[in-house]
Structure formats: C-alpha cells, structure tokens
Image (spheres, grey):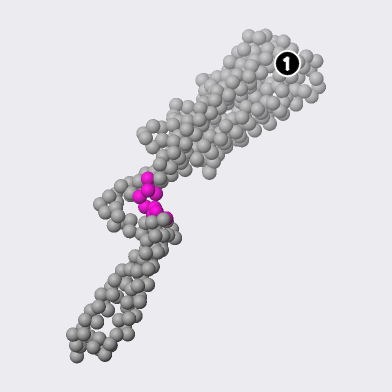
Amino acid sequence: MLTNVNLTTQVLFNRLQTDLERLQTRFADSVGEVANGRRANLADLLGGSGAALFGLKAAVTHADGQVDRIGIVETRLAVMQSALSKTRSVTENFDFRRVLDDATNTAGFGALVRQAATDSIEQVLSTMNASVSGRYLFSGLAVDQPPMQQTNGMVAAVEGVVAAHVTAAGGQITTTAQVDGLLAEVASMFDDTHANPALHYSGQIYRGAPDATDDLSFSDGNGRRITYGAKASEGGVRQLLEGLHLFAAVQKDDGQMSETAYQHFAGAAVGTLDASTAGIVAIEARLGLVQADTTSFREEQRASLLILQSRISAIQDADPTEAATNLASLETQLQASFLATSRILRLSLANVL
C-alpha cells in the first residue's frame, strides 16, 4: 500500500519522465536543425499559412520544368544551326563556278562535276535528316518522320526532263530560249507546280509536314508560344537541291547542249546555288533570333527560381546561431532533468521521513 509520501514521489517521477520525453524530442529536433539547417517545427510555425509555402514550392517545380524544357529547345536549335551551316557549305568542297571557266571542255571535268553534285545531294539529304532524341528537326510537326527521302528518283526524273527537251530541240539544245524552257520545267519540279505531281519535290524528296502547317514551338508558360522550327521544304533548301540536281543531270561533254547553251545553263545553275545560300542564311538568322529569345527566357526563369528559393529559405531554413543556442540550452535542461530523475529513483520512504 502506497503512503502519501510514496504517491507524491511517484507523481513527481511521472511528471519528470513526461517532461524528459518532451525535452528529448525537442533536443532531437534541435539537433536536426543544426545538422540540416531546416526548421523542425515548420508546420507549427506556419499554422494555416502552410499553403503559401506549398504554393512557392509548386512555382519552383514549374520554373524548373520550364528551364529543363528550354534546355531541350536550345539543344535542338544548336543542332539545327549546325545542320544548316553544314548544308550551306556543301558546295565549298567543289567550286561549281569553275564550270563557267572550263571553256576548253577539260577531259573528265564534266564527270567530276556530276559526281561532286551527286555526292553533295546525298550529303544534304543526310544532314537535313538530323534528329535529337529520335525527333526529326526539319519535318515540322511530323517529328517522327525523316523529312528527306534518302534514296529517291529525282536525279533520274530531272535527267528524263532534260532528255525530253533535247529531243524536242532536235537532238541538241542550242539557244538560250530552249535552255530557259528546260530550267523553267525543272524549277516547277522543285517548287511543286509541275503538271505531274509525281515529279514534285514534296513526295520525291521531302516527306515531312506540309509547308502550310505550323513549325515546332513551345510555350513560355504564360500563354505565349515561341516558334523555333524550320522545314526542309523551305526555299533555300529547295534551291540548293535544284542547283545540285541540274549539275548532276547535265554536263557539257554529254553533247546535249551547245557551248553557248551550256554556258547559259551553267550560269543559271550557279545562280540558283547562290540564291540557295542566301535562303539558308535567312533561316539561320531567323533561328538565331529565336535562340536569343530562348536565352532571355531561360535567364528570366532562373532569376525567378532564385527569388522563389530565397523566399522558401526564409520560411523553412533555421537560423544557425539560434539553432545552436537552443541546442545548448536544451542540452543543459536535459542534464538537469536526468540528474533530478536519478535523485528521485534513489529516494525511499526512509529518505523522505
């Protein structure tokens, strides 16, 4: 049977045990604050204002997603610019203007020009099939479809048109008017206006999304879409391939044209290649403006992230000095509580009496 003294001792002991458990919990929380720099009692501190912190964290997640998205777009733009530069420079490996100076009809030069043009065509088709993570860059919205038909019959089709004009001219094209007629028909093949749709650039070579459809774009998160695409069906690429196909299909030493006619033909073909360079440079410039826009957008998102993270830190980060002071204070209280508890455990009825 417990005496009043025993009962008082037991109650005191239980109270100290409860206080000790609370101190131990607070001490563990304080150790965590010092270790990781985060407030341990954040929920109690915020109370009903916790939604504000969740809102800030959601905004950080959104901004992070935007930065990741813009990084992907910037990679695509960089690959597109590289592909366009490589495409534009294909004629630098062989100066097609030299055909204008080959007045003596150097033996084998015609075959060399034809081979250079054929190789350049293959390089352009391959380069314009560039992709990032399996998504083709020059197909418009048809990102799962290679834009260029690597193996196509366009060279043979142009050769067929040339042969028809030679036959119509009586076995050899001799006048500039006849050359202009040939060039006009070949041009209609590459701008998709030829009477025979089977000879069109779109279909024979280009297999991406139609010209009239939208280019690739992404949202800036505020309802504005930034267009960054370019299709292999744009004028500069068409003209480049048109000029290369002309040189692949017609050579002076084939005898299909007279000297004068061929000089006119070659001059027009070189002019088409020159125009293609300007057209491709225009695409590069357009994408360059988009790159500047995306860079600005990325920096805006990163600045927003810094502000948001600063506001979150102000809410949830513990003050290191305050946390260390609290830890030291709690340690002292714990030592005192342990000492008091041990004394109570040593108490007996005789001690009390």
Give the left or right position of residue 193, taking residue 27 as reference. right
Which of 247/175 is in front? 247
Residue pictured at 29% horizontal, 71% vertical: 19
Q: Residue at label 1?
A: 100
Classify residue 283 by image quadrant: top right
Residue pictured at 68% horizontal, 12% vertical: 264
Which of 32/331 is in front? 331
> Residue 95, percent across and down?
72, 23
> Residue 6, percent across and down?
22, 85
Q: Main secondary structure of the magenta part?
A: helix
Give the magenta part as a residue range: 311-320
Classify residue 199 by image quadrant: top right
* Residue at the front extreme, as displayed: 353
> Residue 336, percent across and down?
35, 72
| Residue 319 inside the magenta-drawn segment | yes
Q: Is residue 238 above or below residue 8?
A: above
Q: Is residue 47 above or below residue 13?
A: above
Residue 200 showing in the rendered view: no
What's under tag 1, amino acid-wise?
Leu
